[in-house]
Amino acid sequence: MITKTKGAVTYGIDAKIITIEVNIVQGTNLYVVGLPDNVIKESQHRIESVLKQIKCEMPRQRVIVNLAPADIKKEGALYDLPIALCILQSSFQRQLFNLDQYLILGELSLDGYLRPIRGVLAIALECKKAGIKTFILPKDNAQEAAVVDGVDVIPIEHINDAILFLSNQKTITPVKINVQNIIQNNIKQYDLDFSDVQGQENAKRALEIAAAGGHNLIMIGAPGAGKTMLAKRISTILPDMTLNEALETTKIYSVAGKLKGNNIITTRPFRSPHHTISNIALVGGGINPQPGEISLAHNGVLFLDELPEFMRSVLEVMRQPLEERKITVSRAKISVEFPANFMLLASMNPCPCGYYNHPSRACVCPNGAVQKYLNKISGPLLDRIDLHVEITPVSYDTLSEIKKSENSNIIQQRVIKAREKQLIRFEKYNNIYTNAMMNSNMTKEICIISNSGKQLIKNAMEKLGLSARAYTRILKVARTIADLDNNDNITDLHISEAIHYRSLDRNNWGNY
């Protein structure tokens, strides 16, 4: 007797529905076909142990398991439960109804209890798209899958629960959750706040501009100047995530197995990898491609502390995702795409000793060392960073002030208003939400400046030695500054401030 049910396989952050077929014929042993990996092939031993636990047995005939379509590689132990149920049905040990109408997944432990699996949100979304009404899965994954409206999520703790449910001997209530309430009730209350930062008004202003326009930013300053302290507080001024952003980010964390009990990611990610990170860990990949740090930072912030200390090859692999906001990982037999729409926030010392341009300490680096240190970061990568901010240590008098500076909530409200203006501006464009996402043609169309503004940029490029690549970046940043100023037009004042944030483009940087 041939028994069928439905399963799924994940590729990147998406899923595909597959069919699981079991037939029992004359012969011996269990055979799994349809490009299974070794974990699936080992399912025979787990399933045999589970069947004994529930007073059943593995058929002493040839059991053929087909995972269709056969040209798609299948991985993981998530097919244990559907294979076991199909074996019980095909061997007439249990009567299970309408198996082919359900999507069933779950990893079995040796005593029959189900362990959680990865990629459940992506599978539930594909389940809805395919018109499958019911998803049977481990209880620990039920809340995550219930985020998708229109699919009945049946939580299973033990294989016996699935057998009783499918034989109409037990009613299991589908899990239901209100996603909007979860997002509203789980808005993170940060322990950090910009009011904790004394002084550094120039840096805080730059971070506000970066948050408002989604711009990449690098801070250059001596050790102890407060670069990391400032960076960790940028999350407190970013707008709250929308439902679509929350679902996108949750899919990535689900596939990577990093949800850690959360039903849905409700706060913007802040990823801060160590400078010893490898290329694959940063952009994603491996034999079975998994999302890297740039994808885990999707809709949030990727903070690279001490940027020149990262291997140059690691930094260079970010160039394409910074431009295209996605990363394609290709292998011999598979090619997957991960989203990577993140804000890059970086920090660095100005020189090897750390005290170039310090107001009170002398730099002891030899001639040419400062420029050599900066050259660890390639021009094309710097080209993709809109704001360069020089940070100097705060004086004792400023640090000892009792009066607190502006708090994060006030700054965040200005950022939200600026983002709202951008959403209206980019309504007619696909997948463009912030000024930083504009391409060259859009920049020319939207960032209209006066003749005096053009002359201002020209003078800056000639007198300050700014590179040609700075032109488009200046226009984008100026547009964001105008949005923060609630001004529909880019004025000369906005352009002047944008030019101020191009320190590393100056030809005389590091020459002394």
Image (cartoon, rainbow, N blue to C red):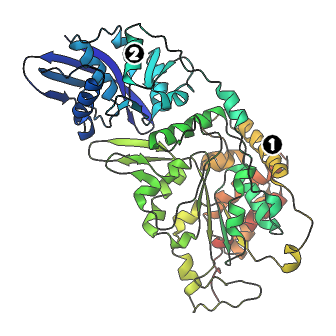
How packed mark 1 is, by other alpha carbons closer than 10 Å (few <14, some 14-19, many 20 or more), is some
- From the top left corner, tell me how far across and down residue 22 is, in percent: 22, 19
Give the labeled residue for mark 2: 102
- From the top left corner, tell me how far across and down residue 371 is, in percent: 57, 81
Nearest the camera: 395 or 365?
395
- From the top left corner, tell me how far across and down residue 78 is, in percent: 35, 32
Give the labeled residue for mark 1: 417
First of labels 2, 1 by sequence position = 2
Rendered image quadrant of residue 219: bottom right
Q: Which amino acid does the dot numbered 1 rest on?
A: Lys
Which dot, 2 or 1, sits closer to the camera? 2
Rendered image quadrant of residue 50: top left
Q: Is residue 259 above or below residue 146?
A: below
Nearest the camera: 487 or 155?
155
How packed mark 2 is, by other alpha carbons closer than 10 Å (few <14, some 14-19, many 20 or more), is many
Q: Which mark is residue 164?
A: none
Nearest the camera: 455 or 242?
242
- From the top left corner, tell me how far across and down residue 134 is, in percent: 46, 16
Which quadrant, please, contains the C terminus? bottom right
